[in-house]
Amino acid sequence: MKITVYGAASDKIHEKFKTAGEILGRKMGERKHTLIFGAGDNGMMGSVARGVSEKGGEIIGIAPTFFNVDGVLYEKCTKLIGTKTMRERKKLLEDEADAFIITPGGVGTFDEFFEILTLKQLQQHNKALAIFNIDGYFDDMLKMMQKGADTEFISDMTLELYQVFEDVDEMLDYLESYVPKEEDVYRLRNLLEEKM
């Protein structure tokens, strides 16, 4: 399975996040999953890649060519794909994946999560989407999503389009056994229109 993992590029994050990222990478490597990621050498991206590499797993990095400067890109990618723009990079990260994992990150990671979620809501894909909630990092975002549902800005159905995990094995089990639900796009559209 090819799994796109999103996460921080910053190396300033706490070691507990990097350690969890390395564990995720090792488990992916042990289970023979291919990592697809933004090719960063630091932060969550680099940690997951090092874990996969440690177990001899395949690593596909996708990054704009202007990122190709010393210390930015992970050097042990099995395959490195260069793009002209960030938009092109995001599309390839989406299209090449069989499933998605969101790990802790900043604005870019939140942007990627909400785009993947929106595309799933609009039935542009029906791939498994998991949030790796290390040390409660996403708790406030999840509360915001629930408040959106409670106040009917977000449908309850949207909250079912992703799953949240603290345990790596449970998360990978979920991705491996995921069976897409066939949602009626018109039903989703009607729910959205009712809220306008």
Image (tube, rainbow, N blue to C red):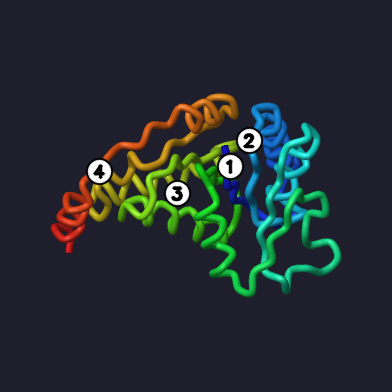
Left or right: where 52 falls relative to 86? right
Q: Are marks 2 and 4 in contact (CB under 8 Å)?
A: no
Give how far apart the Cα atoms at labels 2 and 4 are. 27 Å
Q: Which residue is mark 3?
A: 141
Give how far apart the Cα atoms at labels 1 and 2 are. 6 Å
Task: In the rendered structure, find residue 2 and report the number of the disc placed on it.
Answer: 1
Left or right: where 163 falls relative to 56? left
Q: Vertically, is 69 above or below 80?
A: below
Q: Are marks 4 and 1 in contact (CB under 8 Å)?
A: no
Tell us which disc is closer to us: 1 or 3.
1
Going from the N terminus, do you reach mark 1 or mark 3 first? 1
> Crowding at label 1, few (<14), some or many (≥20) Cα neighbours within 10 Å?
some
Q: Which residue is mark 4?
A: 183
Amino acid at circle 2: His
Check disc 2 and report its element: helix, strand or loop. Answer: loop
Amino acid at circle 3: Met
Q: Looking at the image, which residue is at 70% across and 27% down?
A: 30
